[in-house]
C-alpha cells in the first residue's frame, strides 16, 4: 500500500534540503522559496492517506435471470458501497465476469468517487452459454486524493455468484401420430378425457358415469357424453453433435451443438412430463454399446429412460467447444435410423444445417414416410467473408428443405426457444 509513498517521501525531503542548501550557499532567495514546494507535497501526501478498500467497501451482485437458456441475455447489476466514514475519491472496480461469457452491453468496469455511506451500481449484459459459470472476486483499487498511495483488494460479492444456461419449454408441436397412453396431444376423437367433446347415442357397454342422465330425465332417451381424448405421442429427438455442428458466431457465443443439446433436454423433459414417450439419437458420437453405429436411447417414459437420455445428452455436450473433436464417429446411414425408429414415431431433427448431411438425412426420413420437423439455430455470423459464405449456404439448405415440404423452424439464439416452438405450431401443416 505504501511502496510509492515511502519513495516519494524520501525524494520530497531530499529535494527540499538540496534546494534550500543550494539557495543558502549561493544566496539565491528563489531556491530557498522553491524548497517549500516539496515540503508541502510531502505534508499533503502524509495527511491524505488512503482508505483500505478491503475493509470499507462492500459489493452485492444481482444476476437476472440466474437460470436461463443458452444464447439468452443475462443482466448483471453490481452494487458498490463505501461503508467507511471517509470519502473514496478514486475507486476503481472490475467485476469477475466468467471468462467463457461475453459482455454484449455495458461494462463490468467503473471508476467512481463515493462519499461516506454512498453507493453506486454497475450494470452490464452477458450472453449465456451451455452449463454453469461462477463469477470470480471483484477486483478493486482506490487511491488517495493526492494519488500518492494505492490500495488494492479482491472482494467477494454477496448475492448471485453463478449463471446457468437452461431452457423453459411448456408446449411442443406434435402431429396426430399417437400411442395408447393418455398424454399431451388433444385429438379430434371423443372418449375419456376432461374437455367436453359431444353427445352421441348410447351404446351398450358405455360407462354409467358418462350417461347424460339429465337428458334421459327430460326425454327418456339414453345418450352418452364424450370428452376430447388426449393421447400420448412418441417422439425421437435427433441431435446433431457432429464436428461441423460445433460452430458459433464468436468465441464466447454458444455453439450450435450446445443450443441443440439444451433444446433436446428441455423438449424431452416437457414431453415426458405429459406422459409422452421420448427417445434421443445423437449424431457424431460413438454409441455406448457395440450395437450398430447409432448412439441412441429408444422412446420411453420411465426413470431408466430418463437417466439414459441425460447420459447421452451429456456425452453430446462434451463437444460444445467450437471445432472440438471428441469421441467423433462417422455419420450414420439414414437407413439405420429408419430401421430402428418405429414407423409411428415423430422425428425432430435439431441441427444448424452446417453441411449437406442433415439435409439428406431429413429427405430420406421423409421419403420413408416419417413425420419430420427441423429446428435449426442460426449461429452463423456475417461479420467475415467466411461467415457470410456459410450463412448463404445455410440459407440455401433451408430453402431446399422447405421446398421439399419439410416443416423447418429457424431459431435465433437471441429469442427464447418457446417463441420458435410457437412458430412451429403456427407453421405446422399437420391436421391437429
Image: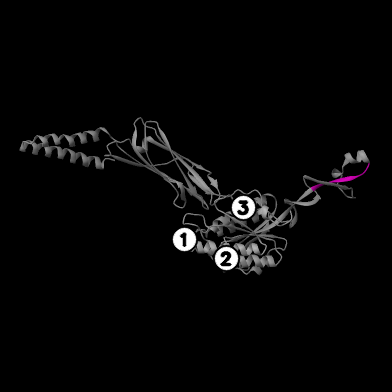
Q: Determine whether, in the image, residue 260 is placed left or right of residue 182.
A: left
Decide: is 158 above or below 386.
Answer: above
What's the magenta region? Answer: 220-227
Q: Which residue is more in the foreground, 322 or 375?
A: 375
| Mark 3 lies on residue | 420
In the image, what residue occupies the spot 71% across and 65% down?
369
Judge whether residue 198 can be spotted in this image.
Answer: yes
Quote the CA–CA distance across marks 1 and 2: 33 Å
Q: Which residue is more in the foreground, 32 or 153?
A: 32
Which comes sooner in the sequence, label 2 or label 3? Answer: 2
Measured from the top left, where is residue 174 in percent x and y? 69, 55
Quote the CA–CA distance across marks 2 and 3: 30 Å
| Mark 2 lies on residue | 286
Which comes sooner in the sequence, label 3 or label 1? Answer: 1
Q: Which residue is more in the foreground, 77 or 388?
A: 388
Magenta part mainly helix, strand or loop? strand
Amino acid at each position: 500500500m505504501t511502496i510509492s509513498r515511502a519513495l516519494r517521501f524520501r525524494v520530497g525531503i531530499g529535494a527540499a534540503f538540496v534546494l534550500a542548501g543550494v539557495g543558502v550557499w549561493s544566496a539565491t532567495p528563489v531556491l530557498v522559496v522553491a524548497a517549500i514546494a516539496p515540503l508541502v507535497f510531502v505534508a499533503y501526501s502524509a495527511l491524505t492517506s488512503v482508505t483500505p478498500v478491503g475493509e470499507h467497501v462492500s459489493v452485492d451482485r444481482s444476476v437476472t435471470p440466474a437460470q436461463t437458456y443458452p444464447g439468452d441475455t443475462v443482466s448483471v447489476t453490481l452494487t458498490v458501497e463505501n461503508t467507511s466514514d471517509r470519502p473514496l475519491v478514486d475507486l476503481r472496480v472490475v467485476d469477475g465476469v466468467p471468462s467463457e461469457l461475453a459482455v454484449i452491453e455495458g461494462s463490468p468496469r467503473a471508476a467512481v468517487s463515493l462519499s461516506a455511506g454512498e453507493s453506486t451500481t454497475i450494470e452490464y449484459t452477458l450472453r449465456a452459454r451451455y452449463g454453469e459459470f461462477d463469477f470470480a472476486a471483484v477486483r478493486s483499487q482506490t487511491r488517495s486524493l493526492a494519488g500518492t498511495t494505492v490500495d488494492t483488494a479482491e472482494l467477494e460479492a454477496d448475492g448471485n455468484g453463478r449463471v446457468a444456461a437452461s431452457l423453459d419449454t411448456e408446449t411442443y408441436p406434435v402431429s396426430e401420430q399417437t400411442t395408447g397412453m393418455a398424454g399431451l396431444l388433444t385429438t379430434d376423437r371423443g372418449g375419456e378425457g376432461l374437455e367436453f367433446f359431444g353427445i352421441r347415442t348410447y351404446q351398450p357397454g358405455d360407462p354409467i358415469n358418462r350417461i347424460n342422465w339429465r337428458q334421459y330425465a327430460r326425454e327418456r332417451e339414453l345418450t352418452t357424453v364424450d370428452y376430447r381424448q388426449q393421447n400420448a405421442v412418441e417422439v425421437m429427438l435427433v441431435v446433431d453433435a457432429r464436428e461441423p455442428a460445433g460452430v458459433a458466431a464468436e468465441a464466447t457465443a454458444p455453439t450450435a451443438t450446445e443450443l441443440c443439446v439444451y433444446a433436446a433436454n428441455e423438449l424431452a423433459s416437457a414431453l415426458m412430463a405429459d406422459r409422452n414417450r421420448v427417445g434421443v439419437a445423437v449424431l457424431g458420437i460413438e454409441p455406448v454399446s457395440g450395437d450398430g453405429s447409432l448412439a441412441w436411447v429408444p422412446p420411453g417414459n420411465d426413470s431408466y429412460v430418463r437417466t439414459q437420455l441425460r447420459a447421452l445428452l451429456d456425452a453430446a455436450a462434451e463437444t460444445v467447444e467450437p471445432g472440438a473433436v471428441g469421441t467423433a464417429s462417422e455419420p450414420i446411414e439414414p437407413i439405420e435410423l429408419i430401421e430402428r425408429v418405429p414407423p409411428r414415431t415423430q422425428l425432430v431433427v435439431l441441427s444448424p444445417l452446417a453441411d449437406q448431411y442433415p439435409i439428406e438425412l431429413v429427405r430420406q426420413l421423409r421419403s420413408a414416410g416419417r413425420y419430420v420437423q427441423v429446428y435449426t439455430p442460426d449461429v452463423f455470423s456475417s461479420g467475415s467473408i467466411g461467415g457470410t459464405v456459410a450463412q448463404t449456404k445455410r440459407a440455401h439448405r433451408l430453402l431446399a428443405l422447405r421446398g421439399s415440404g419439410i416443416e423447418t423452424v429457424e431459431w435465433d439464439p437471441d429469442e427464447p426457444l418457446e417463441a420458435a416452438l410457437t412458430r412451429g405450431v403456427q407453421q405446422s401443416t399437420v391436421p391437429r
